[in-house]
Amino acid sequence: EVHLVQSGAEVKKPGESLKISCKGSENSFTNYWIAWVRQMPGKGLEWMGIIYPDDSDTRYSPSFQGQATISADKSITTAYLQWSSLKASDTAIYYCVRQGGIYSYGYQWGQGTLVTVSS
Amino acid sequence: DIQMTQSPSTLSASVGDTVTITCRASQGISSWLAWYQQKPGKGPKLLIYKASSLESGVPSRFSGSGSGTEFTLTISSLQPDDFATYFCQQYNAYPTFGQGTKVEFK
């Protein structure tokens, strides 16, 4: 069974940078897509974008284009979500999600990473 | 973006009840719809994909129906473990989610 294990909770100040990670548990990591989904406190789910780790083909939801950067390192079966300058409005839980394609549903979800941005 | 509208936002029910949650898409999405269950402090769990296909391991009391713009999730004989929040998701284009339906104890 595939497991996605995410990095731990982070507390940052506005303007700081951050990179969170999502590690896949098996070598077939390069055979599926990894998406990132945001859940703001007490709110619903928002799909941010997706990457195919084998060739780093990356797509972003128009709503999130330019807000954060998705990347991956297939040699260590890990995907990343990073910000260069955090805002308070980036405070949320971020999930990585295994999908079979760009337009697909989430087979497997990571446990989530809570990012808190506060001065 | 394709907008997904769920109703109701909250649903009060008792163990043994049959409950139905509705999801409406702002444009036709064929059968490209999934349903998820989320419990507090946990990531979502896939229940249904392609509108009516039950994910492996999900109890058969969960069922989905619909196509085009109108979809439903039905939970027959509600069990204590089913009190949670449910989300629909379209994947006809970049995925978008409904706002969620919380199923709570009556």
Image (cartoon, coloured by chain):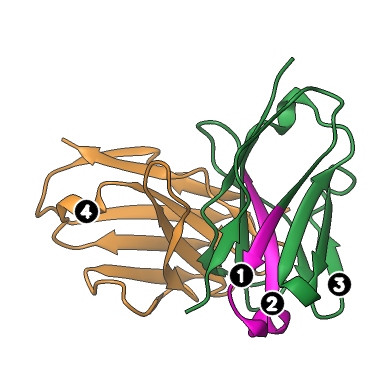
Residue tagged 3: A56
Which contiguous range is marked in magenta? A21-38
Residue A35 as seen in the image, left or right of residue B88: right
Q: Residue at x 52, y 76 (%)?
A: A2
**The residue marked by circle 4 belongs to what chain?**
B
Instruction: Give the residue type that dot 2 points to.
Output: Gly
Calculate the distance from the C-alpha at mark 1 to the C-alpha at mark 3: 15 Å
- According to the colouring, which chain is green? A
Alpha-carbon neighbours of circle 1 within 10 Å: few (<14), some, or many (≥20)?
A: many
Q: Residue B96 lies in what quarter of the image?
A: bottom right
Q: Position of residue A46 (x, y in %)?
A: 64, 48
Q: What's the mark number on residue A101? A: 2
Q: Position of residue B98 (x, y in %)?
A: 53, 49
Q: Is B65 left or right of A20, judged from the image as shown?
A: left
Q: Which chain is orange?
A: B
Separation (CA) of disc 4 from disc 2 = 31 Å
Cα separation between marks 2 and 3: 13 Å
| Label 3 SS | loop
* Residue under label 4: B81
Which numbered tag is attached to residue A98? 1
